[in-house]
Amino acid sequence: MKRREFFKTAALTAGAAALGSSVAEASGAHRPVDNRKVSSVNFPEKQPMIVYSDRPPLLETPRSVFTSALTPNDRFFVRWHMPDIPTYIDTKKFTITVDGLVEKKLTITLDQLKNDFEQVEVAAVQQCGGNSRSAFEPTPGGIQWGVGAMGCALWKGVRLRDILEKAGLKKGAKWIAVQGSEKPAYYETPGFIRELRLEDLDDHVIVAYQMNGEDLPYLNGFPVRLVIPGIYSDSWIKMLSKITVGDKYQHLFFMDHAYRVPDNACECETPEKPAPKTKPIERMNVKSLIGWPVGGTKLTLKSQVVVRGVAFDGGAGIKKVEISLDDGKTWQEAQLDDGKLGRYAYRTFRFGFKPEKLGKMRIMSRATNKLGEVQPFASEIKWNHGGYKYNGIDVVDVEIV
């Protein structure tokens, strides 16, 4: 697809979304905006999504998708940082460069990636650190995501460790800088480069070329991307093209200023008194989300209703999900799936009940992981300037008719 055609399609989509969207806050304090409409025009390889921008593409998954353990590729959220994204990639010429403190500089083609290394798969949730940012008050800067800046896929690729082992690490190697093919529109804008500690790598960190059994969608990082299970997706570099090994931490904008929270026990601050010290957002906290019913659904009195949704954390594993039908006064345990996809994936849940009263009803879900960490009430979550790591108890309002 030519660049002009690609962005013409994207612009039409963004315009349609803007006309049909509402920026009003959802009812109740500290809740993500959850009433935006999907676009009426599709982006390439995507079904209708909630659109925030066409350049760079910023697409949110609708709530109703979150009822299955794996998110369909064509409904998987999209988050790019830079507007200059290649609109054509020749897979026969595409390479990943590995350099820096290595014994042998590598230039790896896609064919070599698929044939010269052991192939592995991992099911893992990818979630933007700013997912549900719109719940914070006052409003922090950044994309005002609702609940759908996340998804879960079965990723296939090659362990990053195996690639580094083939290159051979020199003495003193401690950091890995990863970079994709997206570029800023203005030459003084810092490039999107992320750094990883070598000691943090495990066998689940992979360079992936497939998700859910298919080539990566173009907007999700085709032809290859980094996958780091359990960690917020700021370092899941798309269109991965360069890996540089070093002995020192580089001071970069997207490491020193972006994707950071206050370095204190509550990870909180106030607009009037910013935290003097910050730290990177890394491991995801425990969270659940109701996929059905969605807000505003009309349910029939005394009918059999089955609440469905997903829960996840940073890899400790989900112990239970509970549902409340009385504003959090009492909780009942939902049924979890068998967890065969592993500790980094969604656990789907189901909860059946029969509505006994006409009128408004609030359905709430909260997850607890195997470390005993419990999804908190929204009012318990303190503010941070980046609007990161929101994981308040999920709330959906329906009507019984």
Image (cartoon, grey):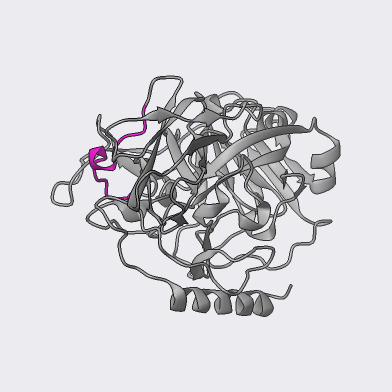
The relative height of residue 344 versus residue 3 in the rendered view (above or below) is above
> What is the magenta segment's predominant secondary structure?
loop
x and y percentages locating residue 51 in the rendered image: 50, 67
x and y percentages locating residue 256 in the rendered image: 37, 45
Q: Is residue 154 left or right of residue 118?
A: left
Tell me which residue sits at (59%, 74%) in the image.
10
Q: Residue furthest top?
A: 371
Tell me which residue sits at (53%, 61%) in the image.
59
x and y percentages locating residue 313 in the rendered image: 48, 32
Tell me which residue sits at (36%, 28%) in the image.
374
What is the magenta range? Answer: 374-387
Q: Quadrant of the N terminus?
A: bottom right
Q: Is residue 375 visible?
A: yes
Q: Is residue 389 visible?
A: no
- Tell which of 363 and 116 is nearer to you: 363
The relative height of residue 188 versus residue 243 in the rendered view (above or below) is below
